[in-house]
Amino acid sequence: MSLVIAPAVRWFTSLAFFLTTPSLAELADTIERIKPSIVVVGTYKKTSSPQFVLRGTGFVIGNGNLVATNAHVVPDSAEPDAPALVIQARGANGDPQVRRAFLASRDKEHDLAVLRIEGPALPTLKLHNSDAVREGQAIGFTGFPIGGALGFSPVTHRGIVSSITPIALPAGNAQQINSNLIRQLKSGTFNIFQLDATAYPGNSGSPVFNEETGEVIGVINMVFVKGSKEAALTHPSGISYAIPANFLTELVKQSAR
């Protein structure tokens, strides 16, 4: 009897997945809406070669003059001769525009940063309550994989939230243990989204969004690498991680104070 029932169960399961998964047309509409809010985060120095260096992806939030990204994307250097922090966005006519950016707030524990940018407001993305995210939920994320090798046109990948799991972000090696690291370890871990999707270098800071609404549920921050860093390109694991958006919501509140 199980041989008769199993195919029917699989058929109904497939049908349910089909009925609850956004169509490709809906996903295409979502991507079209969010792309104007995706920006390149990098540094610029006129006397350097190259003058512009891509460091990761960001996305516009809040009043249109704030950009969210990873803390590790933003350089620590504050020297007078250091390259300027900038973002590259697309104007209304589609032409690229480079704008000066300034660090508004940073949360290294959750690898998040908020930048304040110069110029007119840009289209924004809405942050969603990440506590409502469920395992198995269909997601997409948009950014600039493999740095500038593919050009500066946003690229979208899709997948699912495969797990919501506690994790402690890497904070150094045994030679770098200090009082701050000990306090972090004692404070425990926090939940992070493990994605069944392939992200690449350059995707750091990419928004992870609900395929139907385009609302942001998380921020890509790392990829599971098997072997060397080069393996992330040649043999991607297909496992990526994202910081839940609620941590970003709290950081934005701090930026407004």
Image (cartoon, rainbow, N blue to C red):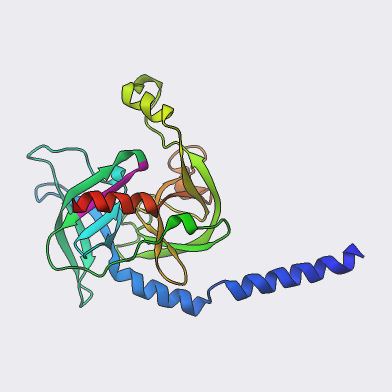
Q: Quadrant of the N terminus?
A: bottom right
Q: Nearer the viewer, residue 132 or 120?
A: 132
In percent of the image, x 42 and y 63: which residue is there? 209
Which secondary structure type mostly characterizes the magenta part of the structure? Answer: strand
The reply to whether residue 54 is in sight is no
In percent of the image, x 8 and y 40: which residue is there? 81
Left or right: 180 in relation to 164: left
Query: Residue 234 in the image: x percent, y percent?
Result: 48, 49
In percent of the image, x 53 and y 44: which residue is there? 165
Q: Quadrant of residue 187?
A: top left
In percent of the image, x 28 and y 46: which residue is there? 73
Query: Residue 205 in the image: x percent, y percent?
Result: 34, 53
Q: Which of 135 and 254 is in front in this view?
A: 254
Q: Nearer the viewer, residue 30 or 92?
A: 30
Which contiguous range is marked in magenta?
Answer: 110-115
The reply to whether residue 71 is in sight is yes
Q: Where 219 falls versus 15 (above or below)?
A: above
Q: Quadrant of residue 3?
A: bottom right
Left or right: 247 in relation to 21: left
Q: How many marks?
A: 0
